[in-house]
Image (spheres, rainbow, N blue to C red):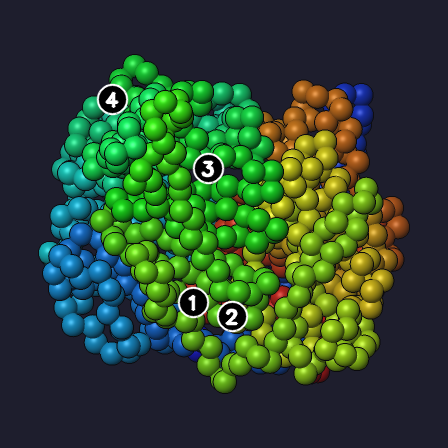
């Protein structure tokens, strides 16, 4: 399918739009739990196969497009700006694996990337070539052209992509509906032909075992939860596939992978609060996985295989005489375990790989990085030469290279001290007050690492980092065409004060010549600026500083972009998350309102110049904030919003419900949870007279399996019935992530940004 070179016209919409939305029929349904009865007038919209439901959704869509027809020229302009700033023919920085360098490239006019590779020059070739966009790559072999695979489909997405260790075969899985159900296939890379092996209805994350003959993949249960791991042998029928693991407990999601060392196949399963890990030596793919870290209620962890010096694994009980140095020549296989047992912000342990029949216990492991209440440890990556620690301090994500430093001399034996083995930390920073730095370990043997760096004003940049010297070499920075100068923009951190006195961070970015300050150190603009306030606040997900090409179109028109780092996210550590979930969920919404009021009260913006923005769980956030403080916002943009959360959490047959009880609570069995959720969920709490509500645009997708389309459809119906100026835009061939293809995604962003600018009175700018 060839995409249009420009954004599509909305000429098919009516030239004159009616002043009122299409009426939504009221068909009352009683919902009674724990003595409370709620009359739901719009639950009938859940009938996805009902032609009347489809017709209603299409009517709402047509009305929204008609009401926004006056913004068609602006949408075209915004689309052209995004397109004009983007280098459409481009390449990623290659990454080495085995005898090949792998990369992806895009071509102007094509929606999707092309996956390719070229051969390494030799065993010591660890520096990727500088590839010029549009220029032929010597020795290139195309692995998968997503544009060719997407031909004839309105939606296309990859869920798995893996190459066998010998480089001979490609495993790939595709979704052409948006429902996140993938068909798995295997391609012979010598001939370019697909083999007869095909498996339908798989979950993402399939992979080859190192022997290249066996594939491990996942399937989902009726609630669309990954719960079974299967093994398939190439050349055999699907009926011969073997279930190697099954998790019946609906709270747990299952994943399968390969350690970076490729020594172990690993199955990990976890609920929102508990984890478990199983290992299998990868040279025996038909063997049985063995449990190495059992689930412990309330304990989360990750496991990484590493090889460490003996002194870090088996320290002697008595030290050697001073004349004898500690030997670190021998090494041991260990597991690096990041866990939170009695360590709220997690600590890092090392433990020998347990023998069959045994498991790791935290009490028997060695502490590598102890718990720190001010530092949230988030991950560890190992190569054969070094470790990389990923963590968060002061609401900023950070990475450090860790190398063991055993002392050359130890204390005399009569002191009775254990040998002192320390760790050298080399934190990687670029010196910006708001930045995102992520150091990535490549393959096991790689002697260097790649460091990604970005900020609200710095395009995404990738550096090669020499571990021995600390030297950084810029490999690539995201091209921004049209003369972008980061010096034209500025970023800052503000702090709001929540209802309970908690300080909540806010990140802001703006264009300097569009937002005027009385002095360079002034706390707020000389006059209120139009402002888009984004929030999420769930699942311990952090919104770190990031660069965005589409955002430039807002900033260049004088809009300030702000992120409210509300509780429920992970920006300030695990306690920050715990204070915004379950029975503390209301903090997420009141934090967001506090951030909005802070920005208005300090003069950054005004209520008639403030738009709230959030998607998925962030859609629940802005929906709840609208009910709490409708007068605070001029507009609310809610993407795939989880606004009917209570109805979903009451139905365990719906996708994700049972696994989500650890995040939101279980209102089905707990009356206190029911009452609490009933008090904040946006759909149930729309005011009877919502004519004073801000303008609302809700976007959704018909095939979304995470937040069903019916939630925003019901919410908008109730808002409209109560007099709120609300609209619904629905993609009829997309999933939770929206439309597929970069041009289609730009069109969607242009539609939303045009609406935001219209609300802010900037549609003519």
| Residue 10 placement (x, y as % from top left) | 59, 73
| Mark 2 vs 4: CB contact within 8 A | no
Which numbered disc flags the more N-terminal residue, 2 or 4? 4
In the picture of the structure, the residue carrying the numbered disc 4 is 288
Mark closer to the observer (1, 4): 1
| Residue count near mark 3 (Cα–Cα under 10 Å), binned few <14, some 14–19, many ≥20 | some
Say if 316 sits above or below 213 in the image: above
The secondary structure type at the circle numbered 4 is: loop
From the viewer's perspective, tell me whether residue 103 is left or right of residue 284.
right
In the picture of the structure, the residue carrying the numbered disc 3 is 369
* Displayed quadrant of residue 414: top left
Cα distance in 3D space between marks 1 and 4? 42 Å
Location of the N terminus by quadrant is bottom left
Residue drawn at point x = 37 percent, y = 53 percent: 440
| Residue count near mark 2 (Cα–Cα under 10 Å), binned few <14, some 14–19, many ≥20 | many
Which of the two residues, 451 or 218, is positioned nearer the viewer here? 451
Residue drawn at point x = 34 percent, y = 21 percent: 317
From the viewer's perspective, tell me whether residue 336 is left or right of residue 517.
left
Q: Which dot marks residue 653?
A: none
Cα distance in 3D space between marks 3 and 1? 29 Å
| Residue 185 placement (x, y as % from top left) | 25, 46
Residue drawn at point x = 50 percent, y = 52 percent: 398
């Amino acid at each position: 399918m060839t995409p249009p070179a420009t954004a599509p016209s909305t000429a098919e919409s009516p030239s004159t739009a009616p002043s009122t939305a299409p009426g939504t029929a009221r068909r009352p349904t009683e919902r009674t739990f724990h003595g409370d009865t709620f009359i739901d007038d719009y639950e009938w919209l859940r009938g996805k196969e009902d032609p009347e439901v489809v017709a209603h959704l299409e009517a709402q869509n047509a009305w929204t497009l008609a009401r926004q027809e006056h913004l068609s020229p602006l949408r075209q302009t915004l689309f052209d700006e995004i397109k004009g700033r983007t280098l459409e023919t481009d390449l990623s920085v290659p990454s080495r694996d085995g005898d090949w360098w792998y990369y992806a490239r895009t071509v102007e006019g094509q929606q999707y990337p092309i996956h390719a590779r070229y051969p390494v020059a030799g065993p010591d070739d660890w520096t990727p070539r500088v590839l010029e966009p549009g220029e032929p790559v010597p020795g290139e072999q195309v692995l998968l052209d997503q544009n060719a695979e997407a031909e004839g489909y309105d939606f296309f997405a990859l869920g798995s992509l893996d190459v066998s260790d010998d480089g001979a075969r490609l495993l790939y899985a595709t979704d052409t509906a948006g429902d996140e159900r993938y068909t798995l296939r295997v391609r012979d890379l010598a001939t370019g032909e697909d083999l007869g092996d095909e498996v339908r209805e798989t979950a993402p994350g399939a992979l080859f075992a190192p022997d290249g003959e066996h594939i491990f993949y996942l399937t989902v249960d009726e609630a669309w939860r990954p719960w079974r791991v299967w093994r398939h042998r190439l050349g055999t029928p699907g009926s011969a596939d073997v279930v190697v693991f099954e998790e019946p407990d609906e709270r747990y999601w299952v994943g399968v992978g390969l350690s970076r060392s490729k020594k172990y196949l690993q199955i990990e399963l976890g609920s929102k609060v508990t984890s478990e890990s199983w290992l299998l030596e990868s040279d025996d793919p038909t063997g049985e996985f063995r449990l190495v870290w059992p689930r412990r209620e309330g304990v989360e962890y990750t496991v990484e295989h590493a090889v460490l010096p003996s002194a870090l694994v088996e320290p002697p009980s008595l030290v050697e005489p001073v004349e004898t140095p500690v030997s670190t020549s021998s090494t041991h296989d260990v597991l690096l375990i990041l866990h939170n047992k009695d360590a709220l912000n997690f600590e890092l342990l090392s433990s020998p790989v347990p023998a069959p029949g045994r498991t790791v216990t935290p009490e028997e492991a060695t502490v590598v990085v102890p718990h720190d209440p001010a530092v949230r440890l988030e991950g560890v990556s190992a190569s054969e030469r070094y470790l990389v620690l990923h963590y968060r301090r002061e609401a900023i994500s950070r990475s450090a290279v860790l190398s063991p430093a055993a002392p050359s001399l130890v204390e005399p034996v009569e002191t009775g001290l254990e040998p002192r083995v320390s760790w050298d930390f080399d934190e990687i920073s670029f010196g910006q007050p708001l930045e995102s730095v992520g150091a990535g370990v490549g393959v096991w043997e790689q002697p260097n690492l790649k460091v990604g760096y970005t900020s609200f004003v710095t395009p995404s940049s990738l550096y090669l980092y020499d571990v021995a010297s600390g030297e950084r070499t810029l490999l690539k920075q995201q091209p921004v065409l049209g003369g972008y100068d980061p010096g034209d923009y500025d970023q800052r951190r503000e702090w709001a004060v929540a209802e309970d006195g908690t300080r909540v961070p806010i990140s802001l970015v703006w264009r300097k010549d569009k937002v005027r300050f009385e002095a360079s150190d002034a706390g707020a603009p000389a006059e209120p600026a139009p402002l888009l306030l984004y929030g999420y606040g769930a699942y311990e997900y952090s919104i770190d500083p990031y660069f965005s090409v589409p955002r430039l179109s807002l900033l260049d028109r004088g809009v300030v972009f702000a992120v409210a780092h509300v509780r429920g996210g992970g920006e300030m550590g695990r306690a920050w998350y715990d204070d915004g979930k379950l029975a503390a969920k209301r903090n997420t919404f009141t934090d967001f309102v506090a951030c909005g009021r802070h920005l208005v009260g300090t003069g950054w913006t005004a209520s008639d110049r403030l738009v709230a923005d959030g998607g998925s769980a962030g859609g629940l956030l802005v929906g709840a904030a609208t009910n709490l403080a409708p007068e605070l916002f001029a507009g609310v943009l809610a993407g795939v919003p989880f606004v009917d959360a209570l109805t979903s959490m009451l139905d365990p047959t719906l996708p994700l419900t049972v696994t989500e009880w650890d995040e939101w609570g279980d209102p089905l069995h707990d009356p206190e949870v029911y009452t609490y959720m009933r008090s904040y969920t946006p759909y149930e709490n729309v005011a009877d007279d919502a004519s004073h509500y801000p303008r609302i645009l809700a976007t959704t997708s018909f095939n979304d399996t995470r937040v069903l389309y019916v939630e925003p459809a019901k919410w908008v119906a109730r808002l409209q019935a109560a007099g709120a100026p609300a609209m619904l835009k629905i993609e009829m061939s997309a999933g939770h992530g929206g439309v597929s293809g970069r041009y289609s995604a730009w069109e969607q962003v242009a539609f939303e940004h045009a609406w935001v600018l219209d609300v802010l009175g900037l549609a003519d700018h």
